[in-house]
Image (tube, rainbow, N blue to C red):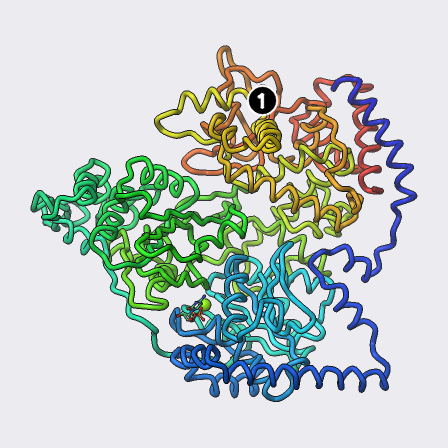
Amino acid sequence: LPITTLRRVDAYLEEYQRQKSRMKESFSDLSFARLNSNIDTEELLFKQRKPLASNKAAVEEILRQRSLQMRDQQQAWQESIEGRRMLKFRGRLPAYKEKEAILLAISKNQVIIISGETGCGKTTQLPQFILESEVELVRGAFCNIICTQPRRISAISVSERVACERGEKLGESVGYKVRLEGMRGRDTHLLFCTTGILLRRLLADRNLNGVTHIIMDEIHERGMNEDFLFIVLKDLLPHRPELKLILMSATLDAELFSSYFSGAAIIKIPGFTYPVRTHFLENILEMSGYSLTHDNQIDDYGQERIWKMNKQTPRKKKSQIASAAEDAVRTADFKDYCLQTQESLSCWNPDCIGFNLIEYILCNICEHERPGAVLVFMIGWDDINALKEKLLMHSILGDPSRVLLLTCHGSMASSEQSLIFEEAEDGVRKIVLATNIAETSITISDVVFVLDCGKAKESSYDALNNTPCLLPTWISRVSAQQRRGRAGRVQPGECYHLYPRCVHDAFTEYQLPEILRTPLQSLCLQIKSLKLGSISEFLSRALQSPEMLAIQNAIEYLKIIGAFDENENLTILGYYLTMLPMEPNLGKMLIFGAIFNCLDPILTVAAGLSVRDPFLAPLDKKDLAEAAKSQFSHDYSDHLAIVRAYEGWKDAEIDLTGHEYCCKKFLSAQSMKTIDALRAEFLSLLKDIGLVDSNATGCNAWSYDVHLIRAAICYGLYPGICSIVHNEKSFSLKTMEDGQVLLHSNSVNARETIIPYPWLVFNEKIKVNSVFLRDSTAVSDSLVLLFGGSISKGDADGHLKMLGGYLEFFMEPAVADMYQSIRQKLGDCIQSK
Ligand code: CDP
Ligand code: MG
């Protein structure tokens, strides 16, 4: 570590001591809430300031007046022409017919479970029924309904729809709140939000005072937050007897939830709105001139079934599109895909996606089918982009001006995602390529055709090796049903499943709940920040409890990174991490950046880790793309390459040449914009928790010291670390848990033959066949010794083990002591800051 950097560290230390006295602030519950951006402080203040008895009557009178006003407004709307039309539409939904029964059940039970087919009106109607009945009873202003959605995009789009059905603007009686975005007003009594937002509200107000109804939608998805919330709510319900909990899903194991909530009432809403014609692979192939033949060779597994082409040309009409479709059918890829159509799931590679089959169906739809948008469910960002590129490159779908090709995946900003809801002009075919985020809760009203590849990326977790995996896997039958349900929401639809029926039948019914298949560190932080007692005891009360080993790994991890002390209590660092709604490693990095005044590049690193690889590699221009990327990659760091690329783009944006810059450098303009948006998000979070001066206009002054940035990356990513073992002409990598690991071919370090550093830190290792590291940054011994781990007292033992006795064997005791004392100083300073 250069002496200049050490001097700077010393200078920083002095500066902190000075700032420390200024920054001291007591963390009473209220300032805690103020620091937390997601909590409505005003609301909290209102509730904490208990009105005096005389005041109380006055407040109630005001609320009653407002309730009356709400009732009159709603009545006027329902009598207007538009309102009557809307009411007529709603009246036809199956849920509407059950309105009285549902309201009665809610009044009689504390917990109600509601299931009904997709499109029957659960999401849009149920919360409204409750609001309407409260308004009618002149209790509108007294109620406070919270409806959770698994994703941002659904919370936003559903709230818009419900406001529209009530003839209001968003932010009147209906609003939404997702991370860092929201629309709610004084009179908002029905709030759609993500589950995460409700959890954060619990942080400030354990009893959820003032909330009258909690509706949890799409609970079959069983995300980690939902399972967590179940435990918290189950504990809370006896203390809040007037609080109602309503659980909804199209496809849920109602009995399981009912028994968890001690025999909660179950209501099933019958019926489906519009029919969806379903085609499986065999039907699609038959349409295209293939048929299934039985080959006579019998193997161990039974009869082999093979798809053979019967006729040469499936379509008589020879338009441009029809011949493109035929070409697609004839390719090797298509045949490969079809040949895999065996009768079991295991011999079918879930990575394989039938691009040509999709192309073929899209061609046919464009050529022969009635108007209507197409929604294609793909696996992830990579194949969405590959398909998009392919479709655009060959203009297979005919006149490009007649096609509107849109994409939708999780790492896009909400504003970009919402483009998919806009209707295309007449005569233009809208095609949306989406991941499973478009699977539940949303209605793209012009969608008539759905293509379902049957796969999704699923995170899983190998607790034994402490390795997270993110692999394409088959979806569940429930997911297939949800995907089918996206067609025919407003008119009859068609669904093409790109796999045979027998494969569908072999899917598991439900996906494994997230809590059983992901690392638990964020969850453990949350449990501690809500002061819910022992982590393992708390989690043993889950609907399905995670493995003990997974829990221990998470606790161990949090101790290593310094978020927990030896007794599993939150440290100050841990406390700050709970206030940053992101993975702890990103949070740690940002905190470091803020403290050491190098936030600007760290914002980019953290944002870059949250989006997909911004470096594009088009198949036909691979060499050019690599050459362009190598201009950014002289630091042996993928993270720094993104920083350099982003800065180049930002400069170009000032001259309005950002787009050209991206084309020239083979960068995804969309990723750059998302990084830009995320940077702003992260900065405002840091301001909210008081780590960055809230009046600062830009990011705090940034000093381009690559060592310091490396240090921040190391501080955040540790214990994601592997050692570099150099051989004569190359190197290999080893981690403690996995032994040999490999670099992802896109990594800048994968192109090197020598890396002049002993360690690589990484954010993500993924097990495919071998264990791969995605992005990595090379770091020196000094950085690992100084910034790896928690930088807290007593941690050196862990380091000694981790570094294979590095200190003991290779360092002079005096030098080791020096490191130790610097670590200690740094640790003290970070804890006190
Ligand atoms: O939640 P569930 O699947 O039961 O249905 P929903 O989201 O409440 O939607 C009920 C119906 O409202 C859909 O079938 C659509 O016909 C209509 N709807 C719409 O036209 N536009 C929207 N943005 C949302 C729903
Ligand atoms: Mg729904």
Asked if the beta carbon under badge 1 is closer than 8 A to the nearest atom of ligand 2, the reply is no
Q: In this view, does 136 lie above or below 3?
A: below
- For this view, does 89 lie left or right of residue 358? right
> Residue 31, percent across and down?
82, 58
Q: Which residue is drawn at 55% across and 42% down?
A: 466
- Residue 691, quarter of the rendered image: top right
- For this view, does 547 lie left or right of residue 7? left
Q: How crowded is mark 1: few (under 14 residues within 10 Å), some or many (20 or more)?
A: many
- Residue 423, quarter of the rendered image: bottom left
- For this view, does 316 lie left or right of residue 147? left
> Residue 282, percent across and down?
19, 54
Of 763 and 822, the residue lying toward us = 763
Q: Can residue 722 be seen in this view?
A: no
> Residue 523, percent across and down?
62, 54
Q: Is residue 376 above or below residue 545?
A: above
Q: Is residue 112 above or below residue 24?
A: below
In the rendered image, the residue lying farthest to the top is: 728
Q: Residue at x 30, y 54 (%)?
A: 427
Q: Mark 1 points at which residue?
A: 636
> Residue 508, percent across and down?
36, 58
Viewport quadrant of the N terminus: top right
The type of residue carrying mark 1 is Tyr
Q: Is residue 755 above or below residue 470?
A: above
